Image (cartoon, rainbow, N blue to C red):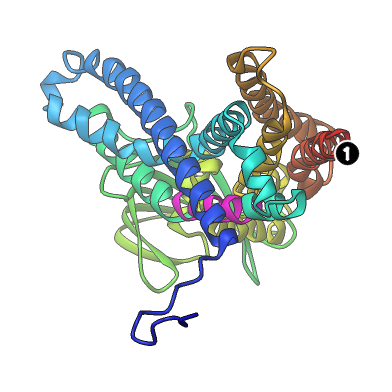
């Protein structure tokens, strides 16, 4: 009996685990990309329709269709950040349900895809989606959203909040300041700035009004068109008030552009590190930071919701679809995912009102749904 030909190339061994992982990752990635593009197209259309209505309203200031398209395009990263977990859920549920319906998952199980390995495979994929969500929400989305707001303010007016603007506080070694910023201009400068200086006993020492203010590089503000009013110190014999007009004035402060933006814009649009610095600033000035702490921890835990979504989708691979339609199960899974995001928002409001621990308020919805998903997964594995 002749042996094998020595000149023939060696047979390359195929790792079934890598093949299975490549199959699942490819199918899920295609499904998630498709769902994401569908949602983004829908949001882009609605945003564009809303902006087209403003073309005639702001035509005098030069607002054109190209500006509306640019603004709507800059809002896409924010929508992508919000949609990533739900897109991961829908895409993963569809793939898992399709595998179960066509008996592909049964074949994968006989090829070595046990429950623990299936869970690990999906968790690794969910971790990759979570890192992508974090990168979009912490780097791309804040920069794009800030640019969009400044572009919109260039033609629609300054960025402001309410009639009195934003109020901040800055505590310094020998005095403390109450700062009022009426609006932020499209170039990033501030207008309508007022500084109220108090001594350590709480008595008003001076008031500064500036028409414009800009952020300098040396931890200070450069004020323009300044009118400074100084009040007599406590115990002074005369009640003389001094007023000074200055072209410019440098005011040293730790209040950064991100902190002012946090007061004028939505805190969820900020970067995680900027939110953390703003919280430290509020604490140093003995101000309530509950709302921003909740938003900070939601920013921390939100990318991890991709892990919750893939765990929530895994039990669908162990269901029987031949006796019923797949669409009903997929719809039920999508509703469960939507309920997760609703619960996440509700917990944020309740935690702020009831003064719950911020990290627990942000993490509790994910914990609840993770326990439910793992329980359903364990029950289905034991039943099968």
Determine whether 241 is above or below 150 in the image.
below
Screen quadrant of the C terminus: top right
Q: Nearer the viewer, residue 343 or 64?
A: 343
Q: From where the camera sits, is residue 361 visible? A: yes
Q: Is residue 157 left or right of residue 362?
A: left
Assess whether residue 132 is covered by the magenta stretch.
yes
Determine whether 116 is above or below 322 in the image.
below
Residue at point 36% right, 79% down?
A: 9
Q: Nearer the viewer, residue 13 or 136?
A: 13
Q: Position of residue 347 (x, y in %)?
A: 76, 32
Q: Nearer the viewer, residue 354 or 263?
A: 354
Residue at point 82% right, 34% down?
A: 380
Corner quadrant of residue 214: bottom left
Q: Residue furthest bottom?
A: 6
Q: Secondary structure at mark 1?
A: helix
Assess whether residue 316 is covered by the magenta stretch.
no
Q: Position of residue 53 (x, y in %)?
A: 24, 12
Q: Mark 1 sits on what residue? A: 382
Q: Residue furthest front?
A: 1
Q: Is residue 292 left or right of residue 47?
A: right
Q: From where the camera sits, is residue 191 visible? A: no
Residue at point 48% right, 35% down?
A: 165
* Number of other residues with Cα within 10 Å of mark 1, as a class: few under 14, some 14 to 19, many 20 or more: few
The dominant secondary structure in magenta is helix
Q: Position of residue 340 (x, y in %)?
A: 69, 29
Q: Nearer the viewer, residue 140 or 287?
A: 140
Q: Position of residue 378 (x, y in %)?
A: 85, 40
Span shown in magenta? 123-136
């Amino acid at each position: 009996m002749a042996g094998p030909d020595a000149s023939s190339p060696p047979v390359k061994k195929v790792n079934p685990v890598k093949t299975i992982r490549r199959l699942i990752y490819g199918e899920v990635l295609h499904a998630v990309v498709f769902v994401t593009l569908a949602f983004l197209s829908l949001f882009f259309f609605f945003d564009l329709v809303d902006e087209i209505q403003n073309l005639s309203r702001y035509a005098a200031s030069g607002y054109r269709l190209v500006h509306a398209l640019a603004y709507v395009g800059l809002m896409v990263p924010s929508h992508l950040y919000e949609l990533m977990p739900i897109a991961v859920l829908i895409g993963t549920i569809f793939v898992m349900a399709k595998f179960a319906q066509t008996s592909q998952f049964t074949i994968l199980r006989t090829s070595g895809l046990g429950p623990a390995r299936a869970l690990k495979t999906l968790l690794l994929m969910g971790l990759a989606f979570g890192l992508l969500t974090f990168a979009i929400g912490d780097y791309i989305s804040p920069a794009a959203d800030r640019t969009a707001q400044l572009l919109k303010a260039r033609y629609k007016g300054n960025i402001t909040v309410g009639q009195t603007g934003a109020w901040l506080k800055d505590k310094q070694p020998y005095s403390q300041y109450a700062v009022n910023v009426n609006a932020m201009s499209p170039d990033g400068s501030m207008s309508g700035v007022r500084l109220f200086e108090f001594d350590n006993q709480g008595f008003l020492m001076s008031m500064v009004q500036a028409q414009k203010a800009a952020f300098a590089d040396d931890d200070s503000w450069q004020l323009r068109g300044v009118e400074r009013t100084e009040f007599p110190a406590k115990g002074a014999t005369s009640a003389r008030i001094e007023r000074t007009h200055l072209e410019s004035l440098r005011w040293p402060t730790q209040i950064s552009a991100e902190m002012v933006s946090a007061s004028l814009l939505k805190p969820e649009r900020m970067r995680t590190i900027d939110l953390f610095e703003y919280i430290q600033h509020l604490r140093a000035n003995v101000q309530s930071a509950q709302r921003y702490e909740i938003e900070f921890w939601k920013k921390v835990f939100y990318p991890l919701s991709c892990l919750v979504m893939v765990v929530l989708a895994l039990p669908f691979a162990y269901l029987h679809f031949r006796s019923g339609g797949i669409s009903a199960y997929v719809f039920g899974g999508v509703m469960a995912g939507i309920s997760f995001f609703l619960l996440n928002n509700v917990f944020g409001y309740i935690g702020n009102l009831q003064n719950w621990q911020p990290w627990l308020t942000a993490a509790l919805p994910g914990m609840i749904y993770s326990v439910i998903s793992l329980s359903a997964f364990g029950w289905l594995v034991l039943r099968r």
